[in-house]
């Protein structure tokens, strides 16, 4: 709308300039030839404005209109000052030349400006891609180093941990213990199980197995995830909903993808108060499937949102900080990506984008 208004204003200015100059020719007496000569040159102003605004075609049209606006004066002055009138008529080709030449220069300048803006946009895009790739490389280096450390620690910890748990079980079965002593052994076994789970997370993060692709029904996958997530509700009045768009199946490792979605759903459950709702939705987009886990919980701070997929980063008191990192790596193994964003109305949405037919598929 603004562009149309600007074009209309310029056309009005050109026409007004031509009519104003032509009208002055009619008002000023014929005897004042020097003033008429000056007015003749005023026609160049609206011609140049038209050429700058609309290119050489606009300049040529304005020049023709200037000649027509000047025609009544030239016919009137021809009877008294034919040589002056002839000079005025000879200037019409100069009007046309000025309009065409100025318009060509203006069009060339606009084209160069557009090329420059397009090149600048492309360079900005390439620079942003380089920045993103650089950040991914730095993150990959950190993940590799942490993965090696995690694998080494996990193997070193798992063997003595199993020995401690086994010894506690033997004592609990073979000794007559007081209740306080039995409770201590129970605590030892429970904490050994918890540490073993943590070690398992370390190993999954350090050396995730390659996906074994299968064709999976999305609705069935969602049902399995929500069945498992129901055990993590812990008495909260949480509602689960699913939405599956016009995409029935995709090729993935069902166990690994189930692990990803279950992790995201449990995160949503833990972030929500009573009466919350978790929506699990899938829709196709450009030969990909977009799976979203949406909640109406507390969301996450903007400063923390870029770090939630980093290993060992957590906002939970009892979290290991590996769940989302493992999920992120699994999605990358499938040739997709995992993102997180706060919802405008509150809560958070995790988005998993996966190819419907992954490249380099192997397995059953």
Image (spheres, rainbow, N blue to C red):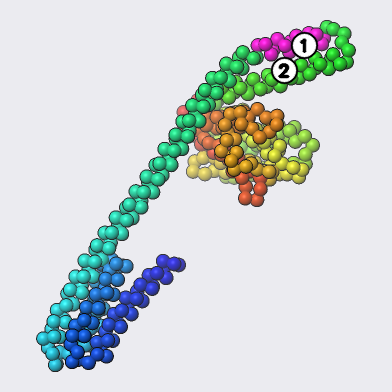
Residue 105 in the image: above or below residue 344: below
Q: Is any part of residue 142 visible from this angle? A: yes
Most foreground residue, 301 or 337: 301
Q: Is any part of residue 61 visible from this angle? A: no
Disc 2 to disc 1: CB gap under 8 Å: yes
Residue 173 in the image: above or below residue 121: above
Bounds of the magenta segment: 159-173
Mark closer to the chain start, 2 or 1: 1
Quadrant location of the C terminus? Answer: top right
Quadrant location of the N terminus? Answer: bottom left
Residue at point 64% right, 41% down?
Answer: 300
To which residue does mark 2 refer? 192
To which residue does mark 1 refer? 168
Most foreground residue, 192 or 34: 34
Residue 255 x/y as whole percent: 61, 28
Residue 123 x/y as whole percent: 37, 45
Residue 141 x/y as whole percent: 49, 26
Residue 170 x/y as whole percent: 78, 8
Quadrant in the rendering for residue 37: bottom left
Q: Which structural element holds mark 2?
A: helix
Q: Which structural element holds mark 1?
A: helix
């Amino acid at each position: 709308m603004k562009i149309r208004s600007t074009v209309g204003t310029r056309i009005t200015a050109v026409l007004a300039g031509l009519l104003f100059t032509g009208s002055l020719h009619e008002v000023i007496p014929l005897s004042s030839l020097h003033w008429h000569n000056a007015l003749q040159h005023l026609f160049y102003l609206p011609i140049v404005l038209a050429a700058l605004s609309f290119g050489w075609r606009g300049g040529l049209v304005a020049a023709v209109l200037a000649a027509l606006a000047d025609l009544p004066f030239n016919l009137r002055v021809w009877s008294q000052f034919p040589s002056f009138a002839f000079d005025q008529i000879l200037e019409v080709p100069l009007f046309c030349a000025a309009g065409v030449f100025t318009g060509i220069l203006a069009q060339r300048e606009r084209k160069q400006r557009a090329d420059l803006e397009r090149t600048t946009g492309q360079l900005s895009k390439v620079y942003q891609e380089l920045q993103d790739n650089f950040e991914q490389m730095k993150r990959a280096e950190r993940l590799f180093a942490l993965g090696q450390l995690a694998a080494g620690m996990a193997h070193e910890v798992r063997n003595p941990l199993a020995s401690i748990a086994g010894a506690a079980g033997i004592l609990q079965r073979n000794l007559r213990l007081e209740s306080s002593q039995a409770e201590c052994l129970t605590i030892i076994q429970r904490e050994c199980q918890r540490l073993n789970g943590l070690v398992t997370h370390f190993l999954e993060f350090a050396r995730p197995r390659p996906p074994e692709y299968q064709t999976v029904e999305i609705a069935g996958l969602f049902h399995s995830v929500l069945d498992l997530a129901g055990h993590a509700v812990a008495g909260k009045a949480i509602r689960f909903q699913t939405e599956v768009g016009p995409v029935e199946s995709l090729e993935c490792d069902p166990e690994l993808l189930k692990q990803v979605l279950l992790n995201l759903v449990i995160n949503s459950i833990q972030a929500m108060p009573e009466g919350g709702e978790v929506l699990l939705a899938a829709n196709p987009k450009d030969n990909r499937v977009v799976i979203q886990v949406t909640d109406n919980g507390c969301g996450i701070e903007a400063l923390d949102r870029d770090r939630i997929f980093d290993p060992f980063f957590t906002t939970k008191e009892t979290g290991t900080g590996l769940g989302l990192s493992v999920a992120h790596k699994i999605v990358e193994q499938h040739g997709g990506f995992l993102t997180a964003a706060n919802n405008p109305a509150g809560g958070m949405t995790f988005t998993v984008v996966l190819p419907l037919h992954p490249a380099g598929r192997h397995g059953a």
